[in-house]
Image (cartoon, grey):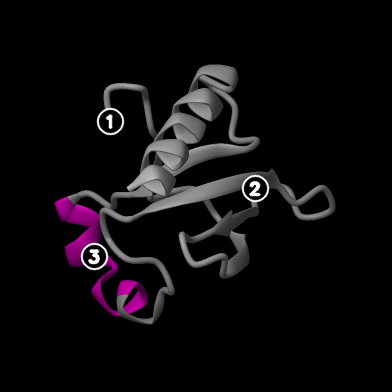
Amino acid sequence: MKKQIIAKDFYKALIRANPDSWDKVIVRFEPDKKSQKLFKEELKSNPFKINKDYLCLGEIKNMPEHFIYVDTTGKVFWGYHNDFFRILTEDD
């Protein structure tokens, strides 16, 4: 229980520190319904789960528009675009 509270406070601190930046923020994988239909096959092979939160560590310097994400288990994903991600706010 205490770990959850600490993690939640950490997330809120990250969100406050970087309100509009893609560097070290909590994001949610949220493709809209139209995209889910258009990219159905691509989303099946995608490692991200819909409506799940990830830590975005920022853009890869030598690969513009490609980002690094970390899930809650610590697994790292790099080289993905941010098209279907949304930066979370304190209200989320």
Closer-to-camera residue (74/49): 74
Residue at the spot 35% in from the left edge and 22% down from the top edge: 90
What residue sits right under mark 1 in the picture?
A: 92
Amino acid at dot 3: Leu
Q: Position of residue 21 (x, y in %)?
A: 59, 27
**Quadrant where the C terminus is found in the figure:** top left
Give whichever of discs 3 and 1 has the lower sequence position.
3
- Distance, label 3 to label 1, CA atoms, is 27 Å
Q: What stretch is highlighted in magenta?
A: 33-43
Specify few, some or many for label 3: CA neighbours under 10 Å numbering under 14, 14-19, or 20 or more: few
Amino acid at dot 1: Asp
Residue at the spot 45% in from the left edge and 41% down from the top edge: 7
Specify few, some or many for label 1: CA neighbours under 10 Å numbering under 14, 14-19, or 20 or more: few
Q: Is residue 91 magenta?
A: no
The image shows residue 33, relative to residue 27, as above or below, that is below
Q: Where is residue 43 in the image (x, y as percent from the top left)?
A: 33, 72
